[in-house]
Amino acid sequence: MLLGQEKQYRKLFLAGVVNGIGDRFSSVAVLAMLLQLTGSGFAVGITLAIRLIPFVIFGPIGGRLADRFPRKLILIATDLIRIIFALTFLLVDSKEDLWIVYVSSFLLAAGEAIYAPARKSAIPLLVKKEQLMKVNSLEQVLIGIVLIGGAFSGGIVAFIFGPHITFWFNALSFLGAAAVISTIAFPEHKQDTDGKLLEKESPWFVFKKVISLSVPVQILLICEVLIAFMNGIDNILISVYAVNEYHLGDVGVGLFYGGLGIGLVLSYSVANRLRKNFLVTGLLCLMLEGTFLLLLSWTHFVVFAFLLFCGVAFMSGIGNASFDTVLMKEIPEEHHGTMFGLLATIGNTILGISMFLAGFALHYLLPRSLGLIGGAAYILIAIFLLASISTKAYRKRRISQKDMTSV
């Protein structure tokens, strides 16, 4: 078992599970509390938007910090600082206290924006290069466990014990994650011999430099932008399908998120066996993901919808693991933090815009029509990028054949 072989990554994985489930518990409770206090979804929408804004500001900063300072220090510090803001939700009792929710949500998301690139860029340092695909597929399992254990169970815990217990749980999860990370033996932080040069290079200069040197990274940048735009539609439609189409209420939302979690966990059974052609595999999975979304927009049976959500996440898990592996191999190690931070910034910014536009579009389109458009877009994106790869490969072969003929 990979987690048995890679002991340092096992600790990072465990910290991610503890941290993620606690955060999900709290998120579900916060949104439920807002609905109880205001009776309106407006406050919920503001909170969701606030959680995306910090990635625009702190994503590049977090990536830069990850390349210049010990990642272990960054991970522990952000976990410990977030304990304070996780507990501030306990002070909310009325509408007049909503500002606490907004400020704390912003600061917790800012911590995540700094934490995420440091954690992701730490993975290639803790595992063998040949294990990257397996580890990235395990990262999808981690997300699945968090969805099942956090989003699905969080609502039940908040309903039975009240939201306050989830806020304490979230604070303790940050403390527990920091304690686990403190035991990880990270490689000694390297001080760059060209430190002065790196200081002069802005994050966006590094971004343009890395992008220009790698065709796979260029393709994945396009993919990141387009997929993030489509993901906004998916995020909105999960709740809309559950509540308005299948009339299952919050139970349906939890059920469908649970299906996504199951699909991500199951994706490991295939993703960890892949050894090559990661980019093409990821794009084929994107095409199949779009196919499942198309079918989801047509079905009226809850069981089929649940299975299709599992299938969507299954393909997404394999594709994400493939794409992450390509990025970790193609991007120079000294720029991992900066690049992952900027990619997260781009992705979350577009996701926020997409969610806003998707919500606006639902005033004019039926949910299933919007789902049909989203699914078709996934398929077209995959076909376009696969055609681009095939064209580049064909031209490369023609050039090499001409060179051999001329010799």
Image (spheres, rainbow, N blue to C red):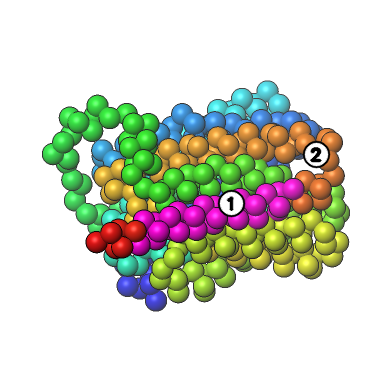
Amino acid, disc 2: Leu
Residue at 32% in and 72% down? 5
Q: Position of residue 171 (x, y in %)?
A: 49, 45
Q: Position of residue 107 (x, y in %)?
A: 49, 32
**Image: magenta residue range:** 373-401
Q: Quadrant of the C terminus?
A: bottom left
Q: Nearer the viewer, residue 224 or 101?
A: 224
Q: Residues within 10 Å of mark 2 (few under 14, many from 20)?
A: some
Give the vertical position of 111 relative to 241 (above or below): above
User: In the image, which disc is placed on residue 117?
Assistant: none
Kindly state the secondary structure of the residue where label 2 is placed. loop
Amino acid, disc 1: Phe
Q: Position of residue 373 (x, y in %)?
A: 74, 48
Residue at 19% in and 51% down? 188
Q: In the image, is 264 to the left or to the right of 131?
A: right
Q: Nearer the viewer, residue 239 or 137?
A: 137
Work out which residue is located at the far top of the displayed protein and give it.
96
Camera-side mark, 2 or 1: 1
Q: Is residue 133 magenta?
A: no
Q: Contact, CB < 8 Å: mark 2 with mark 1?
A: no
Q: In the image, is 341 to the left or to the right of 8?
A: right
Among numbered discs 2 and 1, the one appearing first in the sequence: 2
Which residue has dot 2 on it? Answer: 362
Residue 361 sits in quarter? top right
Residue at 85% in and 56% down? 246
| Residue 288 visible in image | yes
| Residue 78 visible in image | no
Q: Residues within 10 Å of mark 1 (few under 14, many from 20)?
A: few
User: In the image, which disc is placed on residue 384?
Assistant: 1
Q: Is residue 385 magenta?
A: yes
